[in-house]
C-alpha cells in the first residue's frame, strides 16, 4: 500500500488549479494523468525577463522588459493586417503588434497616454524595433507580479505554456517533504540538496545551465529514479536467488538424439552458451540467465537443449512466448525435434479450449507432457506442473519482471529461469531492465548465412520496384512487403497495408496475401501458413511480422516508408530474410528528402548487420526513451534519467543498490524505510511485496 505521505503526488492532475476537462486530456497526453506525472515533466528552457533596456538599447531577438508610455493606436484597414500600438520612452519609440486581437482587449490593456510595463520578444522590422503579442502587459504598480524567470515546458498541440505553468505552480505547492533516502556523504560529495528543494529548483531554472541534465537538481532526481530501478531489480533478484535451487544433471541422452537430428552443427557461441547454462543448472543455486542474441542467431535450439537437460533429469520445462504467432512457431520448430527424441511436447495458448485444454492441463499436472510451450496462458491459475525445473521466457521485451516471476512460481522454489531476448540491448539498458542477471551472448551467426544485400531507393521509384518483382517471382523468390507504421494504431496501419495489398493484387493476382494486426489470430496463421508453403509469394504486412516470424525461403524484404521506422525495427524486419541458404535482399523505400536522423539510420542499415552495433547506434541517435519505444515494451521508461547523459549515475546506483541490499535486505533501517517511499514513488511496488514486512 502506498504511504499516505505520497497521496498528494498521486492525486489526479485535474485537481490542480486551472485544469478543467479539456486541459485535463491535454495534460494527460503531455505528461500523464497524475500530479506526479506533471512534476516529472521538467522544463526544457527558460525565459529570462531580467533585461530592462530603454527602447534605444533593445537588441533584435532579445526578451526585454520595458517601461513605456502608450501612444497612438492604429487599427488595421483590413482584418488581415495587424493592429498596431505606438509606444515610447525618453529614448525612442517602438510598435506593439497584434494579429486579430479581441476588440476590447487592447483598449483595456493599453490605454493611450498611460504607462505600462511590457515584456516579450523584440524584433526589428524594417530597421525599427517592435514587439508582437507581448507576453505580459502590466501597470507599473504590478511590476512585482512579473515573473522575471519563467520555466518553459515541452508542450503538445493545443496546450499553451501559461496553463501548464499555472498547473505546475499548483503541483509544486503540494509537494511534501520526504525523509532522505540518499546517503548524506554521497549527497554532499555530489553537491546535491534534499529531494524537495531539488524538485523545486529543477522547475525554477535561473540560467540555461539549470536545464542541463547535469545540473545538480536534475542529476539528483535522475539518480533517485535510477536507484529506485536498481533497488527494485536487486530485491527481486535477491528473493529469487534466496530460494533454494536444485542441481539438475542430465544424462545427455535426449540431447544427443536431438543434436543428431539437427541438419547443422552448433556454432561455438551456441556451445559456449550451453556450457554456461549447464553449469548454472548443475549448481545448487537457481539459474537467472539472459540469453542475448541477434535475430537468427539460433537461440531456440539452445533453449531446447537446456530444456532437454531438465527432462533427462526427470523434470518438466516450459517455454513462454509473448504472442500467439510466436508460441505456435516455437511449437512447430520444436515438435519434430522432440519427436526425434521421443519427448512429449504440447502447446497451450488462449486458443486451446474445452476438452483439448483439459487434456493438456492434466498432462502437465501428471508430468506426462515434458515440455509445454505457450503464451501468457501458462500463467493461469489452473495450470499446474508436476515438476517444472526450467522456465524459458522468449522475452522480446514484452514481459515484465513480475510476469517472469509468476511463471517461475509455477515450478515452486528453485525453478531455473532462462530469458531469451531477440533485440540486442545495449549494456546500459541490460542493466536497467535485468539488473544483475547473468548474460550469455550468441554473438556469432550460424555459418552459411549470406549477408543481406541492403539498398535504399526513393519512393517515387515504387513502380520500378513493383515491376522488378516480376523477375524476382520468376526466380522463385518469396517476398515480404512491409507497410509503414502510420501511428501506433493497428487500425490505421491496416488501412495502409490493405491499399498496397489491393494494388499488388491487381498486378500479381492470387499470389499476394495480407496480414495485419486487426486480423483474427486464426486468419493470420492461415495466411502465414500459405506464405510458408509458397502458395502466397508476396506477403503484404504491417509490423506484426517484426518478431519471430521464420520463413527461411523468404529472400526479399521491401520496407515502404523506411524513414518512419526506428533502427531496431528495421533491423528486426530485415532479420526476417537471410535465414535460409539463399542470397537475400532488403530494399528500403523512403520518402525523399530524408531528414538527418532518418538518413543516418538508413546509412547504418546499409553498413552493418551486427545487431549489437545497431543497438548502440540506435541509442546514440534517439536516446534511450525512444529506443524503448512504445510503453508496453516492458523495458523501463525513465522519466527523469537519460541513459546517455546519466550513464555514470546508473553505474553508481547499481553499486549503491547492491550495498543497500547487502546491509539492509529488508529495508528496515531509517534509510531503508525512506527507500521504501522512494520505491513507492517510482511505482516499484512489486519489489516491496518481496520484503518480509512489505
Ligand atoms: P533466433 O531465435 O535467435 O532468432 P532461431 O533459433 O530461430 O534464431 O534460429 C534461426 C534459424 O537458424 C533457424 O532456422 C534454425 O534452425 C537455424 N539455426 C540455428 N542454429 C544453427 C546452426 N548452428 N547452424 C545453422 N543453422 C542454425
Ligand atoms: Mg527464434
Image (cartoon, rainbow, N blue to C red):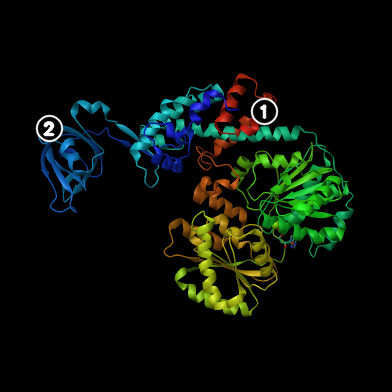
SS assignment at label 2: loop
Q: In the orientation shown, which residue stands out farthest toward the top?
A: 670
Give left or right: position of 584 versus 253. Answer: left
Q: Is residue 367 above or below residue 462?
A: above
Q: Nearer the viewer, residue 436 or 520?
A: 520
Picture coordinates of residue 175, whole percent (x, y) = 45, 26
Kindly indicate the quadrant of the structure image that contains residue 113: top left
Q: Is residue 406 above or below residue 689?
A: below
Q: Which quadrant: the N terminus?
A: top right
Query: Which quarter holds ligand 1?
Result: bottom right
- In this figure, what is the number of numbered marks? 2
The residue carrying mark 2 is 114
Q: Is residue 679 above or below residue 98?
A: above
What residue lies at 58% left-to-right and 58% top-to-bottom?
517
Mark 2 nearby-residue class (10 Å; few <14, some 14–19, many ≥20): few
Q: In the orientation shown, which residue stands out farthest toward the front?
A: 354
Q: Which mark is residue 661?
A: 1
Any part of residue 268 in sight: no
What residue lies at 54% left-to-right and 52% top-to-bottom?
618
What residue lies at 58% left-to-right and 27% top-to-bottom?
2
Earlier sequence position, callout 1 versus callout 2: 2
Mark 1 nearby-residue class (10 Å; few <14, some 14–19, many ≥20): some
Picture coordinates of residue 452, whole percent (x, y) = 61, 66
Q: Which mark is residue 126?
A: none
Q: Are marks 1 and 2 in contact (CB under 8 Å)?
A: no
Circle 1 or circle 2, nearest the eye: 2
Kindly indicate the quadrant of the structure image that contains residue 685: top right
Amino acid at each position: 500500500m502506498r504511504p499516505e505521505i505520497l497521496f498528494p503526488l498521486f492525486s489526479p492532475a485535474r485537481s490542480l488549479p486551472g485544469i478543467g476537462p479539456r486541459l485535463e486530456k491535454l495534460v494527460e497526453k503531455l505528461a500523464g494523468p497524475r500530479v506526479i506525472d506533471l512534476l516529472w515533466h521538467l522544463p526544457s528552457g527558460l525565459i529570462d525577463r531580467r533585461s530592462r533596456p530603454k527602447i534605444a538599447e533593445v537588441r533584435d531577438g532579445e526578451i526585454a522588459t520595458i517601461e513605456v508610455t502608450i501612444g497612438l493606436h492604429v487599427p488595421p484597414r483590413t482584418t488581415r493586417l495587424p493592429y498596431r500600438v505606438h509606444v515610447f520612452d525618453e529614448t525612442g519609440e517602438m510598435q506593439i503588434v497584434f494579429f486579430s486581437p479581441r476588440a476590447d482587449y487592447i483598449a483595456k490593456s493599453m490605454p493611450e497616454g498611460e504607462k505600462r510595463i511590457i515584456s516579450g520578444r523584440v524584433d526589428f522590422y524594417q530597421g525599427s524595433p517592435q514587439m508582437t503579442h507581448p507576453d505580459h502587459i502590466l501597470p507599473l504598480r504590478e511590476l512585482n507580479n512579473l515573473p522575471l524567470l519563467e520555466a518553459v515546458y515541452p508542450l503538445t498541440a493545443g496546450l499553451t505554456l501559461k496553463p501548464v505553468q499555472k498547473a505546475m505552480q499548483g503541483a509544486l505547492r503540494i509537494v511534501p517533504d520526504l525523509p532522505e533516502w540518499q546517503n548524506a556523504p554521497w549527497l554532499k560529495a555530489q553537491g546535491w540538496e534534499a529531494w524537495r528543494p531539488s524538485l523545486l529548483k529543477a522547475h525554477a531554472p535561473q540560467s540555461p545551465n539549470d536545464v542541463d541534465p547535469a545540473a545538480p537538481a536534475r542529476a539528483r532526481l535522475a539518480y533517485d529514479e535510477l536507484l529506485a530501478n536498481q533497488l527494485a531489480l536487486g530485491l527481486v533478484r535477491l528473493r529469487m536467488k534466496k530460494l533454494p535451487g536444485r542441481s539438475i544433471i542430465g544424462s545427455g541422452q535426449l540431447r544427443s538424439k536431438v543434436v543428431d537430428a539437427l541438419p547443422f552443427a552448433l556454432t561455438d557461441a551456441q556451445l559456449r552458451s550451453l556450457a554456461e547454462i549447464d553449469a548454472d543448472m548443475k549448481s545448487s543455486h537457481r539459474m537467472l540467465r539472459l540469453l542475448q542474441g541477434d535475430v537468427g542467431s539460433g537461440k531456440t535450439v539452445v533453449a531446447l537443449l537446456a530444456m532437454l537437460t531438465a527432462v533427462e533429469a526427470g523434470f518438466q520445462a516450459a517455454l513462454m512466448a509473448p504472442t500467439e504467432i510466436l508460441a505456435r512457431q516455437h511449437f512447430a520448430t520444436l515438435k519434430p525435434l522432440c519427436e526425434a527424441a521421443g519427448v512429449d511436447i504440447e502447446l497451450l495458448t488462449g486458443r486451446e479450449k474445452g476438452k483439448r485444454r483439459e487434456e493438456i492441463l492434466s498432462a502437465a499436472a501428471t508430468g506426462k507432457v515434458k515440455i509445454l510451450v505457450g503464451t501468457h496462458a501458462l500463467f493461469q491459475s489452473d495450470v499446474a506442473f508436476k515438476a517444472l525445473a526450467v522456465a524459458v521466457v522468449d522475452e522480446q521485451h514484452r514481459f515484465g519482471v513480475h510476469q517472469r516471476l509468476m511463471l517461475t512460481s509455477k515450478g515452486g522454489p528453485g525453478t531455473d529461469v532462462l530469458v531469451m531476448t531477440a533485440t540486442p540491448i545495449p549494456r546500459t539498458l541490460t542493466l536497467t531492465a535485468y539488473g544483475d542477471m547473468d548474460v550469455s551472448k550468441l554473438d556469432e551467426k550460424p555459418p552459411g548465412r549470406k549477408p543481406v544485400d541492403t539498398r535504399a531507393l526513393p519512393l517515387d521509384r515504387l513502380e520500378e520496384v513493383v515491376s522488378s518483382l516480376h523477375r524476382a517471382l520468376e526466380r522463385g523468390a518469396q517476398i515480404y512487403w512491409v507497410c509503414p507504421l502510420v501511428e501506433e494504431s493497428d487500425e490505421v496501419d491496416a488501412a495502409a497495408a490493405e491499399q498496397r495489398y489491393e494494388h499488388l493484387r491487381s498486378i500479381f493476382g492470387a499470389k499476394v496475401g495480407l496480414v495485419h494486426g486487426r486480423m483474427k489470430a486464426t486468419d493470420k496463421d492461415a495466411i502465414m501458413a500459405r506464405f510458408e508453403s509458397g502458395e502466397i509469394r508476396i506477403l503484404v504486412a504491417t509490423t506484426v511480422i517484426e518478431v519471430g516470424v521464420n520463413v527461411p525461403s523468404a529472400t526479399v524484404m521491401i520496407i515502404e516508408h523506411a524513414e518512419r521506422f526506428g533502427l531496431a525495427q528495421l533491423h528486426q524486419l530485415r532479420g526476417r530474410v537471410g535465414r535460409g541458404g539463399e542470397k537475400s535482399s532488403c530494399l528500403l523505400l523512403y520518402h525523399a528528402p530524408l531528414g538527418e536522423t532518418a538518413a543516418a539510420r538508413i546509412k547504418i542499415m546499409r553498413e552493418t548487420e551486427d545487431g549489437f552495433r545497431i543497438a548502440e547506434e540506435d541509442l546514440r541517435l534517439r536516446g534511450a526513451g525512444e529506443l524503448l519505444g512504445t510503453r508496453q515494451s516492458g523495458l523501463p521508461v525513465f522519466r527523469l534519467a537519460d541513459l546517455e547523459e546519466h550513464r555514470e549515475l546508473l553505474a553508481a546506483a547499481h553499486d549503491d543498490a547492491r550495498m543497500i541490499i547487502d546491509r539492509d535486505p529488508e529495508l528496515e533501517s531509517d534509510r531503508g524505510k525512506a527507500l521504501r517511499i522512494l520505491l513507492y514513488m517510482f511505482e516499484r511496488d512489486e519489489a516491496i511485496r518481496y520484503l518480509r514486512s512489505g
